[in-house]
Image (cartoon, grey):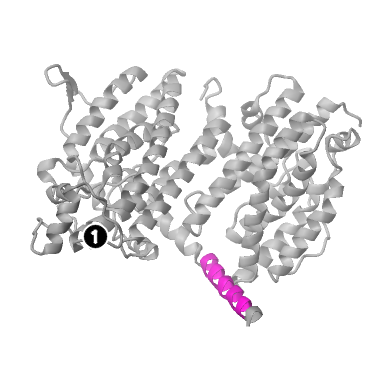
Amino acid sequence: MTIDTQQALFGFALRLGDTSLVLGHRLSEWCGHAPELEEDIALTNIALDLVGHARLWLSLAGEAEGQGRDEDRLAYRRDVFDYRNHLLVEQPNRDFGHTIVRQFLHDAWAVELYERLATSPDAGVAGIAAKALKEVRYHVQHSAEWVIRLGDGTAVSHAKTQEALDRLWPYTGEMFEADAASSALAAAGIAPALADLRATWAARVADTVAEATLTRPADGWMHKGGLRGEHSEHLGYLLAEMQFLPRAYPDAVW
Amino acid sequence: MYTQGLDSKADQGAQPSPRLVTDNDIRFQERIDAEEKIEPRDWMPDGYRRTLVRQIAQHAHSEIVGMLPEGNWITRAPSLRRKVALLAKVQDEGGHGLYLYSAAETLGVSRDELVEQLLAGKAKYSSIFNYPTLTWADIGAIGWLVDGAAIMNQVPLCRCSYGPYARAMIRVCREESFHQRQGYELMLALANGTAEQKRMAQDALNRWWWPSLMMFGPSDDQSAHSAQNMAWKIKRFSNDELRQRFVDATVPQAEFLGLTIPDPDLRLNAETGHYEFGAIDWSEFNEILKGNGPCNRERLEARRKAWDEGAWVREAATAHAAKRAQRHLKNVG
């Protein structure tokens, strides 16, 4: 299927916006419940950045679509099958180890992507990426440091973190999966081919995992479906909670 | 956010009255009278130190516990703009907790000791956070009323005689006044919104009004150690004075919103220019202090759960830091 650039921008911005929003939501669930005060502040701060990125991407998506949908319309009035986030980020927090591993696997990808998008010839895309890049560089530093602390901490923390890595690894393939939108933008030179991010992502992950004394899982079966709206059961509950007010009071402006 | 209940007679550890017995005591009071700031290494009476530790710790705990009722609505904020604002606000509160614990540490206690006291139920935090946040309008009401009351109390603390506390409060107050404006703006959107939104706003005002007035603590004639705290310039205005200021500032704001303050006795006294208000139900306040508020158990449970479930993470961080230090020593040696 071929699509025009505006349609491709819509799809791509939706994918990045949804992924940022869902991950920001998951992190915000920690607010007030983190293992220590510094982490409460850090996780909330990262959630804040991610929801900020989501606003920018969803606004761009709305403009590209040209149907008058703004960031809130897109965030609050779409059901599960219209969400385009990666399955990785909708996985539940479970414990701090799962949260940190999920974050690191995503952050390492986001840095690679935003570095390339920051030089995109599309000014809208480049502007968002340049802003987000400053923040995701800090995010990956934070999550990588925690992966190392937990992996190379106690026997308990090592085991929990390895378990999280093993459990979440099959969700990493989707981040590099091309869809019609990303392929069209890559062909137009607006975005990188996502498969090209894999080598540098894998190198960064391998370094951190090794420093954390953890074992990198083998690449086997990978879960897919987020890009065509086939999600895990977790996303429905997340959206039910997030969208409650605009759905319950459809005429209200907040 | 805020501290209260300090002046209740049940409080432990306060000095009943100033007894200027030593030269040190006299010199200390002279410095206070001259508006000099007391710094961590300066001599200070034990009672002054104890009062400050108790007050600053209570204030820090209130910030941390206060993250819970507001955090309750982050995942349900009705627009992305509101979500970002609420995340930023709750993050600010965590930051306030952090500087306040640091200010308390300058007086010779550790943050871990203070946190243990909180988790053991031995330390107080503002009772306002033992009320539930039931609708989105509660987030507006907390910003407008609770942060508004906190500011009334905290602006004078920027001139507190103890330097580290006064300096922490300058930053805290700047952020709180931003939160208060944000809360009011949220209420305004509801008050100007649909009939259902307006109902939500009125309901929140009904539930938060009286607890906000109680935040200033017992009335002056019931207050155990205001006089000593005033002499030490830890406190600058009495509970009743501050409460009156809050009522005078807030009633016109409610009128502008088109909301009704839930007090049939409220009226403007044309002669004094002040609003007179009805009697506060102190029995409710006292029950909450005793642990019988609607959310006392939930709040402490949530803090304990976070602490207990985070133990393996903190242990990992400590173990890793030790391993790193050892490797560093080996490399250097």
From where the camera sits, is residue A23 visible? Answer: yes
Displayed quadrant of residue A199: bottom right
Q: Residue at x 46, y 19 (%)?
A: B193
Viewer-nearest residue: B122 or A134: A134
Q: Is residue A213 magenta?
A: no
Helix, strand or loop for disc 1:
helix
Q: Horizontal and vertical percent for residue B293?
A: 29, 47
Residue that sits furthest to the bottom in the current view: B333
Q: Horizontal and vertical percent for residue A135?
A: 64, 45
Three-letter code, disc 1? Arg
Viewer-nearest residue: A252 or B18: B18
Mark 1 highlights which residue? B49
Q: Residue at x 34, y 60 (%)?
A: B106
Viewer-nearest residue: B163 or B261: B163
Q: Which segment is the magenta one? A: B312-329
User: Is B246 placed above or below B128 here?
Assistant: above
Q: Quadrant of the N terminus of chain A?
A: top right
Q: Residues within 10 Å of mark 1 (few under 14, many from 20)?
A: some
**Chain of the residue under label 1:** B
Q: Main secondary structure of the magenta part?
A: helix
Displayed quadrant of residue B239: top left
